[in-house]
Image (spheres, rainbow, N blue to C red):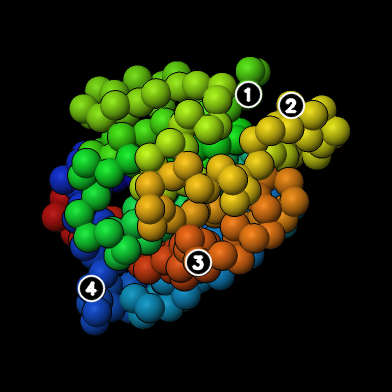
Amino acid sequence: MRHFLEVDDLSASELIEVLDSAAEPSPEPVLAGKGVALIFEKPSNRTRNSSEMAVVGLGGHPISIRGEEIGLGVRESVEDVTRVLARYHSVVGARVFDHSVLEAMAKVNEVPIVNLLSDLAHPCQALADLLTLRNRWGALRGRRLAWVGDGNNVARSLTLACGLAGIDVRVACPAGHELDPVAVDGARASGVEVTVTNDPAGAVEGADAVCTDVWVSMGQEGEQADREDAFAGYQVDEALMARAAPGALFLHCLPAHRGLEVSPAVIEGPASVVFEQAENRMHAARGLLLWLVRKRRQT
Ligand code: CP
Ligand code: NVA
């Protein structure tokens, strides 16, 4: 049984299969009469709505469940929750604080588990981001992407995804907020160049895409003031974008904070593809579900 807890659960060729599935104009209704459970321990706009509509697009019935309703590991053990949901649903997705909860769910191995964001990774976002870049650029291989800001869950998954897709990555993070070395090594092992720096201008120089995310992720609200100090100088503004390659794109997974990690002019400007990314969350989720269900049929 296949799970999707991080991008590197897929091989490079499987990643392309998932992106191709996302682009299928009339996907087979592989979830007709079936359920998909979507658990959310944290707030969500894009992930919940895109996942629900992806399930609907495959003929299935999504059931979104708030963390406190189900009490993962509190009301009932993570394993028992998973074993029960496996009796009703074809796939279970979960957004959790602690990535190890997803690992425990996957270990049950009775239903495919999809990571809808954890403290460690946001692989569904990375799929949507690659789909967005592919729609804009055509071929991905040989391009260069700059990440400016927090070396967080979104940065980790996107770096691994770039590795599999053949995109070089330059990551600029302040000291103490660097990208997980597992992602750096993983992307390098895939054969791309990964540069790690504390210099946003150097990272963005000549890049084909510039990406950022919030400075304060869900669960880190108590660190707001310290983080705003640490990330001073990391805002993606027009001066920084001017260093990128001509026609470079600006990406942000949203929600965004104008005036902090991105200037209003950049997010509203011609380089910005943030709402294409948001739409592509739905297409990417549909492609992933299609791929997971087909894989399960083959086993
Ligand atoms: N980008 C993203 O995951 O958004 P939500 O937190 O609204 O789901
Ligand atoms: N890094 C952010 C992403 C939100 C979609 C967080 O984890 O809150």
Does residue 143 appear in this view?
Answer: yes
Q: CA distance from mark 4 to mark 2?
A: 43 Å
Q: Secondary structure at mark 3?
A: loop
Q: CA distance from mark 1 to mark 4?
A: 40 Å
Crowd tier of the residue under label 2, counting other residues whose Cα lies within 10 Å: few below 14, some 14–19, many 20 or above: some
According to the picture, the residue beneath numbered tag 4 turns out to be 24
Crowd tier of the residue under label 4, counting other residues whose Cα lies within 10 Å: few below 14, some 14–19, many 20 or above: few
Crowd tier of the residue under label 1, counting other residues whose Cα lies within 10 Å: few below 14, some 14–19, many 20 or above: many
According to the picture, the residue beneath numbered tag 2 turns out to be 230
According to the picture, the residue beneath numbered tag 1 turns out to be 174
Residue type highlighted by circle 3: Pro
Q: Secondary structure at mark 4?
A: loop
**Residue located 69% across and 39% down the image:** 215
Question: Could you say which is closer to the camera, residue 112 or residue 287?
Answer: 287
Q: Verify CB contact (< 8 Å) between mark 1 and mark 2.
A: yes
Q: CA distance from mark 1 to mark 2?
A: 7 Å
> In the displayed structure, does residue 67 sit left or right of residue 28?
right
> In the displayed structure, does residue 131 sit left or right of residue 125?
left
Q: Is residue 49 above or below residue 247?
A: below
